[in-house]
Amino acid sequence: QVQVVESGGALVQAGGSLRLSCTISGLNFDRYAMGWFRQAPGKEREGVSCISWEYGTIYYIDSVKGRSTISRDNAKNTLYLQMSSLSPEDSAMYYCAAGFVPDNYCPGSWSGDTTYRYWGQGTQVTVSS
């Protein structure tokens, strides 16, 4: 049974920073591409970032580039997303997702929901102005 648990969401002031974590059990973590997604009220869920097995490829959406870092610790089955210079536009539920890939890369479809099989319940990030 695969379990995906996000943590680290919080209420922060604009300009602040957060580190989100995601711990997975029940699968071979180091053979899965990992993604972070977010969904704000009234908006579609969007892919934020993806990281392959061992940092082979990393992608970010333009809105978080330069102020966010995705990372993973395969020994701990844990994924991270460090975000800084937060703005109210970053407020959303953040989800972690795992997708099996046959090699050390994030697929071209990395920002699409269907690329990932396993999802967490989300952690809420709220940025106040």
Image: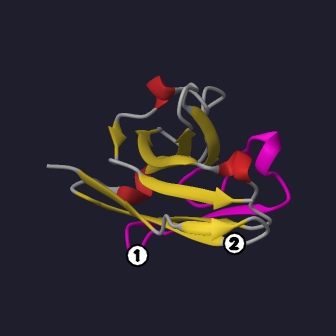
- The secondary structure type at the circle numbered 1 is loop
Query: What residue is at 70 percent from the left and 63 percent from the top?
Result: 69
Q: CA distance from mark 1 to mark 2?
A: 25 Å
- Taking 5 as reference, is 37 above or below it? above
Q: Secondary structure at mark 2?
A: loop
Quarter-wise, where is residue 15 in the image? Answer: bottom right
If you read the primary sequence from the N terminus, does the residue marked by circle 1 or circle 2 appear first?
2
Q: Position of residue 88 (x, y in %)?
A: 71, 51
Q: Nearer the viewer, residue 75 or 20?
A: 20
Q: Residue at x 58, y 26 (%)?
A: 43
Is residue 57 in view?
A: no
In the image as oriented, which residue stretches furthest toward the left? Answer: 1
Say which residue label 1 marks.
Answer: 75
From the viewer's side, name the closer residue of 16 and 30: 16
Amino acid at the residue labelled 2: Ser
Q: Is residue 118 left or right of residue 22?
A: left
Q: Position of residue 75 (x, y in %)?
A: 40, 75
Query: Which residue range is magenta in the image?
Result: 51-78
> Which residue corresponds to the image point at 55% horizontal and 42% vertical from the top-left?
38
Residue on which the image places disc 2:
17
Numbered disc total: 2
**Three-letter code, disc 1:** Ala
Question: Which percent across, then down, holds residue 55?
Answer: 64, 59
